[in-house]
Image: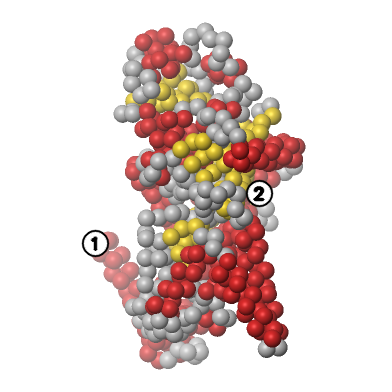
Amino acid sequence: MENQTFIIEDELKKLPGKPGVYLMHGEKDEIIYVGKAISLKNRVRQYFQPSRNRGAKIDQMVTHITRFEYIVTDSELEALVLECNLIKEHRPKYNTMLMDDKSYPFIKVTTGEAYPRIMMARQMKKDKSKYFGPYTSVTAVKDTIELIRKLYRLRSCNRILPRDIGKERCCLYHHIKQCDAPCQGYISQEKYRESVDEVLKFLGGNYDKILKDLEKKMQEASDDLEFEKAIEYRELLHSVKQIAQKQKITDTGGEDRDIVALAREHEDAVVQVFFIRNGRLIGRDHFYLRIAQGDENAEILSSFIKQFYAGTPYIPGELMLPVEPEEREILEAWLGEKRGHKVHFRIPKKGEKEKLVELAAKNAKMVLEKDKERIKREEGRTIGAVKEIEKLLGLNNLVRMEAYDISNTNGFASVGSMIVYERGKPKRNDYRKFHIKGVQGADDYASMREVLTRRFRHGLEEQKSGKELGSFNVFPDLIMMDGGKGQVNIALEVLDELHISIPVCGMVKDDHHRTRGLYYQNIEIPIDHNSEGFRLITRVQDEAHRFAIEFHRKLRSQGQVHSILDDIPGIGPARRKALMRTFASLDEIKNAEVEDLKKIPSMDEKSAKNVYNFFRGSEKEDTEATLMEEQ
């Protein structure tokens, strides 16, 4: 519906008295507010009726509304889910917004397997595994897993056991005494399961047995004058005590709960969350929100709960809060549906639980006071830089920007990277890596086409299925390509084929490989090299390149890079590496004679002929295909 034909008074009369979601549009037709209602007719009409109680933010918003639209749902719960998704997608100006989306790691024990593994996981899946967390620190997770390997020697490899027992040599972890090598049959399944049971107790907070065992072993080693062993046990003992201290008991209920409290000042708010699992504090974190002066604490907490728990894979059975949030009943029902069991909100008024909520509030206040000046400076560097880019390109409300890059080694293998910046800051949880599957050789354009097609096709599929925690379901407000006209056109072609409309610009470099300007709508736009916008573009460009290069190097170091050479009979990892070391490019290998290939270490006459015939056969097929097309 066009803005100039939208008469608000007439459209208000057409509103249904059903549950749903409404979207308010501003002067530039951008979405400035998203809300939900039990009755769309009653709720939307309230915005356009005089009221003393609705607050300055709503009064200001109403003056900017040029039109509204709505989506009818079957229930208020369905409306809440849709509201959360639309707020996340559009980030409207007048909604209370969570400034930092975060995801937390878990420790996963694959108890559904014959020989369970221990690893870090970002999502909880219904796969018969046991998950512990979430932890607020990746370092804490890695340190805990390393400690468990030293104590209990659980495996982390991807081998399928018992099927693969004895098929490959044992890995480094066995040699450094951090794995009992079930892959070699060195430990029975029953004995291994005993270790797994001890690990599950350890991760559940039962440290007494391991502390006693380590103290006993340390003393025995010392009595036997094995001082190196005694020191090793002492260090392990210290590590376990550190973890036990960090996860000290905070309440005797032994339940899973999150303690949520907030502090606010002017248009800034900080929400502090304590994560309690099995009655133990396993971590805490704080979150910044942009609010309006008239917002009530109940409204702020309601907005936080919607945004935070829409994106977290684990929801505890109880949330302890300082005040009752708006829409309490529907929020409890929504969280209960996501969790699969009931979720209760508790607002304690006395005792230890009230003190815990007060402690969370004090922590939130300390963070706000300590960080408010830094936040303002950071916003100038990040949000200010985004505003400059918006002005350069004539765009509005740039929240999410995605940049892409390709990396390969002389055409042997290509990988792609996708990095994400939100509000001028990297959002590393949303970074993605791509193995190029359908392109051989150093063809950056074809590789980029494949990456973009896969990324946005997956996104469309996730949006269609209503997947809240998908890897690709949130689309960017701007795509930034590393290059000029050619790369931009590739992106525009892919978007056009998929019927997606997203602005695309190119980050152009000069002859010295330094950022020069932006290519947008067939024009190169120069940028002031002293501006924050220029610095942000440079950071994005460098980060995309770094992420792609690191991914490629990691695969090469692990021997996981797949290239056309892997398809040649008789060419395994050792011969492939020898070929890549000897020849500068894939073209040189293609043009090599059998005698040249035989001279390479580890190559015999049969394998040399296989390489020679493989590429000559490819050329013959290409020639025949060309002749058929011409005929």
Indicate the secondary structure of the residue bearing disc 1.
Answer: loop
Q: Which quadrant of the view contains residue 570?
A: bottom left
Q: Amino acid at mark 2?
A: Thr
Q: Which residue is mark 1?
A: 631
Q: Position of residue 220 (x, y in %)?
A: 65, 83
Q: Residues within 10 Å of mark 1 (few under 14, many from 20)?
A: few
Q: Quadrant of the N terminus?
A: top left
- Residue 241 is left or right of residue 168, and the answer is right
Q: Residues within 10 Å of mark 2 (few under 14, many from 20)?
A: some
Given residues 212 and 338, the one toward you in this image is: 212
Q: CA distance from mark 1 to mark 2?
A: 50 Å
Q: Which residue is mark 2?
A: 538
Given residues 300 and 268, the one toward you in this image is: 300
- 544 above or below 37? below
Indicate the secondary structure of the residue bearing disc 2.
Answer: helix
Mark 1 in CB contact with mark 2 (< 8 angstroms):
no
- 312 above or below 231? above
